Each structure stands twice: as C-alpha cells, then as structure tokens.
Image (spheres, rainbow, N blue to C red):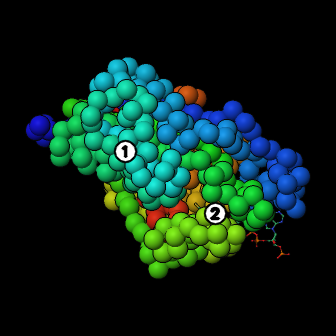
Amino acid sequence: MTVPHGSSVILSGIGAYAPEAVLTNDALSRMVETSDEWIRTRTGIRERHIAADGETTSDMSTEAARKAIEDAGLAVQDIELIVVATVTPDMPFPNTACFVQKKLGLGKIPAFDLEAACSGFIYAMDVARSLMLVSGYRHALVIGAEKLSSITNWDDRTTCVLFGDGAGAAVLSLSEEPEVGILDTLLGADGTETGILCVPGGGSASPSTVETIERSLHKIHMQGNQVFKIAVRVMCQSGLNLIERAGLTSQDIDLVVPHQANTRIIEALSSRLDISMDRFEINLDRFGNTSAASIPLALEEAYRKGRLKKGANVLTVAFGGGLTWAASLIRWH
Ligand SMILES: CC(C)(COP(=O)(O)OP(=O)(O)OC[C@H]1O[C@@H](n2cnc3c(N)ncnc32)[C@H](O)[C@@H]1OP(=O)(O)O)[C@@H](O)C(=O)NCCC(=O)NCCS
C-alpha cells in the first residue's frame, strides 16, 4: 500500500498492566541483607510488582495491548502488526508476539520480538514506525513487557532490589496530520560493553547445563557502577542530540519520560538537559526497573494524569544492556 506523502505515526492508544503482587523493600530486606533505607536512597525504589507463577510475558503483554486498543477506539482486528520488546520472552522461540497474536485472537498478521534490553520499547517504536511508513500498515501494536523476576538472582542483593515486572503497550497509527506523533528517533549501541550487564547462560555461548544453573548464569549479572556512569553519559548525549537535531531547545520539551532505572540517573539527566524534575514522569518508586516495559508504563501514567496534551513535546530516553541507548521525540496529537 502507498503511504501518502507527509504521513505521520501517532500513538493513538496506550495501555498498561502491572501484576497484582507487590514486593516492598521491607519484604526484600527479609530475603537478603539490605534495608528500605539503602534501596530508597541509592535507587529511589520503594516497591515493585512481581508476576504470579505461571503468568507469562505474553499474558501481561496481552492485558496491556487490550487496554491500548480500547483506548485507541479500535477493534482488535484493526491491528496489522505486532512488535514485542522484551528480554524475558515466554520461550527462546516462538517469539512472544506470536503468543500475543493468538491470545488476542488476531488474524495472521506479522508478529515478532525485538531485543534491545531497556531501550527495547523505543527501538520497537522506531522499527514499527518505519515499517508503517514504508509498507503502509495502518495500526501496529508496540509492546514493552518483562517478567524480570524470572531472571533475577534473588540471592544477589546488588541486583535483586532493582527489578520488577509489568507491561505497557501503544497502538501506533498512521495519520495524515503532519508534524505530530513520533517526530524523530535516535538509536545507538556499544558492543564493546556486552559484559557489564547480561544474562551469560542459556544461549549458544553457554548452553544450559547443571553447572550453568549452579553458577546462576541464567540470571542477571551487572557491574552497577560501570553501568551507572555510562548510562548517565549516553542518556544525556542522546537526549541533547535529539533535541538539537529537531531544532528545539530544552525549554521546548514539555515532558521527559526516561527509562526508570535509578532516581540518581534521572536527576543527573535533569541537570545536564537543563529540564527541571517536575517535567519528568517518574514511577520507579512503585515499579523499579522493568526494562522494556519501563517507558510505556511511565508514558501510560503520564497519559492518565493528563500530562500528554495536544502539541506537547515529549522526550523519551533509555539505555540498557548491550549496551544500547535510544531517544525519541513525540509531539502529542
Ligand atoms: C546498583 C546501584 C544502585 C549501586 O549503587 P552504588 O551507589 O553504585 O553502590 P555500590 O555498588 O558502590 O555499593 C556500595 C556498597 O553498598 C553495598 N550494597 C550493594 N547492594 C546493596 C543492597 N541492596 N543493600 C545494602 N547494601 C548494598 C555494596 O556491597 C557496597 O558495600 P561496600 O562499600 O562495603 O563494598 C547503582 O550502581 C546503579 O543504580 N547502577 C545502575 C544500575 C542500572 O541502572 N542497571 C540497569 C540498567 S538498564
């Protein structure tokens, strides 16, 4: 199908899903040697949602997707493409998006996963948007969903306090209104830093054995300090580059929806972008770091609170394992 020249891609619907169970810092401090005070002051996190046993990434994705489709005022059958960003697929294959397609009762539309860790949702939005503008898909589901509790080492206090589960979804729709929706996206990666944040076991490099399980190689491994420093640098650079590329200044940005990893990282971003904290959407106190779900979960909260007004310039910015980073500039329709 030919896409009319000047078409844009808007986020026509947003939905979110958080599992019912909440794990507080106090409860965690009964599992490992930590405290509510340490977690709050070093990260900003107070609690996180944890999926039920048997609740999968595709289950959470489907819940969020249903809400996003309803919010867009569409029928399920209007969706023509599904992209799921996740590092915790239901299975290595088939991809999670195929499970979502089945659970939504959708027809035989293309469905695939994209893995760019915590930057995954922005990567997925850009891939979907590009496919829409080239191939003419009118409505696409872009989902960021994670069951990080399934790859968290619950004996490692340096990582287990950080992560949570959840899903966020957006319906992307072609629009003939120019200069709205996703205006620009910046993607990047640094493959020399694959070792500082990873799940080393279970892939072709280190297939599952009794030993890989005993050494917890199927769980998240992270050098927190290193990640912290690079995160601040790349998030600031990509945010600033994107604002400049759009011919805008920091003062033109109405809302920043950052990846929710650590309040101190977000504060550094606020200071270097020269955008005050009241123009940031923050929910990590209640969700922790939910990787690919982080941006859409925060975006959905901003939307529900009425912070996404027509004409508002919204900057989303993320970094994650890979290392990967991504930023997108959205003008709300
Ligand atoms: C993980 C992180 C919160 C750690 O904070 P930090 O200020 O760098 O803390 P450090 O790692 O230097 O550890 C300081 C001390 O606290 C201890 N500590 C670590 N985790 C702890 C916990 N949960 N509770 C109590 N003490 C803890 C350490 O053992 C260390 O003790 P020591 O000084 O006796 O060796 C921080 O590095 C971070 O947020 N990094 C980025 C992580 C991230 O965003 N990852 C996801 C990327 S998408």
Q: Amino acid at mark 2?
A: Lys
**Quadrant hosting ligand 1:** bottom right
Which residue does the image show at 29% across and 45% down from the upper left?
129
- Residue of label 2: 219
Report the quarter where the N terminus lies.
Answer: top left
Q: Left or right? Give the position of 194 relative to 24.
A: left
Q: Position of residue 309 (x, y in %)?
A: 46, 31
Which residue does the image show at 43% across and 21% down from the upper left?
70
Task: Judge depth for marks 1 and 2 and give the one in front.
Answer: 2
Callout 1: few (<14), some (14-19), or many (20+) C-alpha neighbours within 10 Å?
many
Can see residue 40? Answer: yes
For the image shown, how many numbered marks are present on the structure?
2
Looking at the picture, tell me which residue is in the foreground, 123 or 183.
Answer: 123
Report the quarter where the C terminus lies.
Answer: top left
> Which of the numbered marks, if any, corresponds to residue 324?
none
Which residue does the image show at 43% across and 30% down from the upper left?
103
Q: Position of residue 93 (x, y in %)?
A: 42, 52
Q: Position of residue 256 (x, y in %)?
A: 52, 47
- Residue of label 1: 83
Q: Position of residue 232 (x, y in %)?
A: 58, 66
Q: Left or right? Give the position of 145 relative to 189.
A: right
Callout 2: few (<14), some (14-19), or many (20+) C-alpha neighbours within 10 Å?
many
Looking at the picture, tell me which residue is in the foreground, 179 or 58.
Answer: 58
